[in-house]
Image (tube, helix red, strand yellow):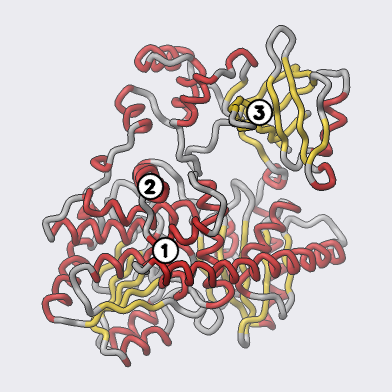
Amino acid sequence: MRWTIKPKPEQKSIDQLSEALGVDDLVAQLLLQRGISDYEEAKAFFRPELSHLHDPFLMKDMDKAVQRIEQAMSKGENILVYGDYDVDGTTSVALMSSFLMESYPNVATYIPDRYGEGYGISFQGIDFAADNDIGLMIALDCGIKAIDQIKYAKEKGIDVIVCDHHRPGPSLPDAVAVLDPKQEDCKYPYKELCGCGVGFKLIQAIASKQGKTIDDLIPYLDLVATAIAADIVPITGENRVLAHYGLQVINKNPRIGIKALIDQTKKRELTITDVVFIIAPRINAAGRMKHGQHAVNLLAETDWPTAKQFASEIELFNTERRSLDQEITQEALIQIQENQEEEKFTSVVYNEHWHKGVIGIVASRLTETYYRPTLVFTKSGDKLAASARSVKGFDIYNALEGCSDCLEQFGGHMYAAGLTLLEEQYEAFKNQFEKVVSETIDPKLLQPEITVDAKIQMDQITPKLMRILKQFAPFGPGNMTPIFIAEGLKDTGYARGVGEDEKHLKCSVYQPGYNPIGAIGFNLGDKLNVVKRIKPFDAVFSLDENEWNGTVSLQLKLRDIR
């Protein structure tokens, strides 16, 4: 592990913020590192308000989109709400369709089949729209690169509104409106919305024309928060506001579909991390194992017994997904071990029988193990399809652009992407991908990094500090859980391995002169000997609370030891 300590802000800035907020230097330092430098910015950070959301009409083409939807409603046109099969797409479709159907009945939904149609707007989906007399299609979390498909829709007499958040290509589709804050000429102040976030801005704009306020839209924020968590977008600015209020909805009054999912688990108070690891995989499992429409049906359902039935079915999909994920990951790891004749900068594996629905998860697992930009391929019809995952600091989307002459199509983000190619191009692509990555990646990025916010002494770890740090939530990219380093620690003598095969580490540590504090290190069982030595050690950790027999105590959540 590489430990990188963030630069400490100037002491003058720390002193000024500390005095303005009435907090100690450590808290002021953490805030400055998050770009918060005065009282008003701190107030917005600690007390997010829905009034902080931007005017949706600042987004390019928003007026055109609203006008076309109002026209469709006034003329009685059929509207098709179309979205991708992942969490961001299915939550977007549930959000938009539920909102429109509050006041307009002629709304249908469509999620493309992951295997038969693939990512984004499909020609098959447009044919479905034409066959069902659809006049307007609203595409969510996809469409920004669907040049040919939207041209085809236009030829069929179907207007399309694109609500996307992916990077545009060199040209835009000929849609009625293209809502995407990442367009170079879009002046919308916040660029990091997820697809469901862009969809929310559209319903916010429509609602304002109907005389509704932002408070009327709060019930939709559980969907938006779920998409923000699952899509790993920065939890800063507008996303922080949406996630903050969305989590409140999830925990206090979620829609029936999300409540049914939560009831399948033992959790009662969910954090963003819980949404990522508990709710999102279940929603995703529908599209991975069966069809994404199952997720939309659940998320839009208003009848409790029906929702419970849908949630039970999705739980079965998720169980099947986990089993396949483990099986394929093991096969892929063996393949890497057998074929790694020399040190490479990438991991690329292929098996035509691997289930396309889990190759993204497998790619993430392989990246965690070997810490290389990773591609997992499988057969998809007469082509090969792959999921790509990257390491921190390396843009895998740009790397794929450098190999685009070998690809049929590709799309995605800096850290995750998808692609298809002809089977005969596989070896050429594999070699070119290795070449592009080896020539552009900083070798230090191939070693996992822990970014440390600040050094801390044991006497600074207090219940008051913990109360303040809790208010930094929700955590995520752009506002990660604060990580600290403490030096010269010693074990009190209780260090031991715990869990299956003693793979976790439990101990109690102290600095000379200060009281000991309990610590837990998941997957750090191999560090037991380091802790038990007489020689002092350093540790990086976040702060956590441990509840045992009704008593809550502070503990260190260890990330690494040396």
Quadrant position of the C terminus in the picture:
top right
Q: Secondary structure at mark 2?
A: helix
Crowding at mark 2 (Cα within 10 Å: few <14, some 14-19, many 20+): few
Residue 556 is tagged as 3
Quadrant housing residue 334: bottom right
Q: Residue at x 68, y 21 (%)?
A: 517
Report the amino acid beneath label 2: Lys
Q: Residue at x 85, y 58 (%)?
A: 342
Quadrant position of the N terminus in the picture:
top right
Q: Secondary structure at mark 1?
A: helix
Report the amino acid beneath label 1: Gly
- Measured in 3D between alpha carbons, the distance from the residue under mark 3 to the one under mark 1, in whole angstroms, is 36 Å
Give the mark nearest the N terminus, 3 or 1: 1
Give the mark nearest the N terminus, 2 or 1: 2
Give the mark nearest the N terminus, 3 or 2: 2
Q: Residue at x 38, y 81 (%)?
A: 149
Residue 169 visible in image: no
Q: Judge depth for marks 3 and 1 and give the one in front.
A: 1
Q: Position of residue 238 (x, y in %)?
A: 34, 45
Residue 81 is tagged as none
Report the amino acid beneath label 3: Leu
The residue identified by callout 2 is 252
The residue identified by callout 1 is 257
Name the one closer to the observer, 508 or 135.
508
Q: Secondary structure at mark 3?
A: strand
Crowding at mark 3 (Cα within 10 Å: few <14, some 14-19, many 20+): many
- Measured in 3D between alpha carbons, the distance from the residue under mark 2 to the one under mark 1, in whole angstroms, is 14 Å
Q: Position of residue 530 (x, y in %)?
A: 84, 28
Q: Position of residue 462 (x, y in %)?
A: 56, 18
